[in-house]
Image: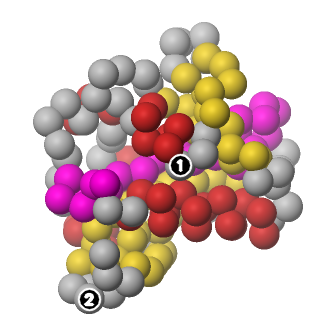
């Protein structure tokens, strides 16, 4: 894989981020990037949104949305990975790990000791990826979603 870099989600990258492809069966587990972009307008102090850009081609190959809220009333909302999307053609090549590690580094810089993720379990779901990059399942929401925790 060529060198990757993170860029803030902005008007230059939003169309490319929305155009990231999915593998069959993944669509039910992910919302459009524009939904995440709207969150940053509502919660600009807590949202952390980046695109992953391939330096060699200057193409957007992934997107990650995290948030940091030291005043959250629940641990899993204090430092959270809300969304990650790696283009179908780039999955399995380290792009997702790169993005999650960048989010974890940001969480450490902000003084958090753990990073959380909440996701829907399922056959084609993101659970195996989250486990592979270091999240451990620590619970379940009242809605049946899995809660993962990564110690920092």
Dot 1 lies on which element? loop
Identify which residue is drawn at 78% across, 35% down: 75
Percent x, y of residue 39: 51, 51
The residue identified by callout 2 is 56
Residue at screen point 39% across, 71% down = 52
Q: Residues within 10 Å of mark 2 (few under 14, many from 20)?
A: few
Image location (x, y in percent) of residue 103: 60, 61
- Furthest residue in direction bottom, as rendered: 56
Tell me if residue 16 can be seen: yes
**Quarter of the view holding residue 72:** top right
The residue that appears at 56% across and 32% down in the rendered structure is: 118
The residue indicated by pointer 1 is 133
| Closer to the camera in the image, 67 or 91 | 91
Q: Is residue 10 left or right of residue 134?
A: left
Q: Closer to the observer: label 1 or label 2?
A: 1
Which color scheme did the rendering employ for the protein? secondary structure
Q: Is residue 63 left or right of residue 118?
A: left
The residue under the point 85% across, 61% down is 111
Snapshot quadrant of residue 107: bottom right
Magenta residues (range) = 72-92
Q: Would you say residue 108 sits in the magenta stretch?
A: no
Q: Position of residue 129 (x, y in %)?
A: 43, 42
Pinpoint residue 78: horizontal percent, then vertical percent: 75, 44
Q: Earlier in the sequence, mark 1 or mark 2?
A: 2
How many marks can you see? 2
C-alpha gap between disc 1 and disc 2: 24 Å
Is residue 26 or residue 7 the one in the foreground? 26
Does the segment drawn in magenta span residue 79? yes
Crowd class of label 1 (few under 14; some 14 to 19; many from 20; radius 10 Å): some
Q: Is residue 116 visible?
A: no
3 in relation to 115, above or below: below
Compared with 145, 65 (above or below) is below
């Amino acid at each position: 894989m060529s060198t990757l870099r993170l860029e803030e989600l902005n008007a230059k990258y939003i169309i490319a981020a929305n155009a990231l492809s999915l593998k069959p069966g993944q669509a039910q587990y992910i919302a459009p990037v524009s939904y995440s972009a709207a969150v940053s307008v509502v919660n600009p102090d807590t949202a952390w949104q980046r695109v992953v850009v391939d330096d060699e081609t200057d193409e957007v190959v992934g997107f990650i949305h995290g948030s940091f809220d030291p005043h959250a009333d629940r641990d899993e909302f204090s430092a959270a990975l809300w969304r990650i999307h790696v283009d179908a053609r780039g999955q399995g090549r380290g792009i997702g790990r790169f993005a999650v590690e960048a989010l974890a580094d940001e969480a450490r810089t902000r003084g958090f000791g753990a990073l959380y993720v909440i996701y829907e379990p399922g056959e084609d779901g993101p659970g195996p990826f989250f486990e592979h990059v270091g999240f451990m399942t620590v619970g379940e929401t009242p809605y049946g979603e899995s809660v993962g925790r990564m110690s920092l």
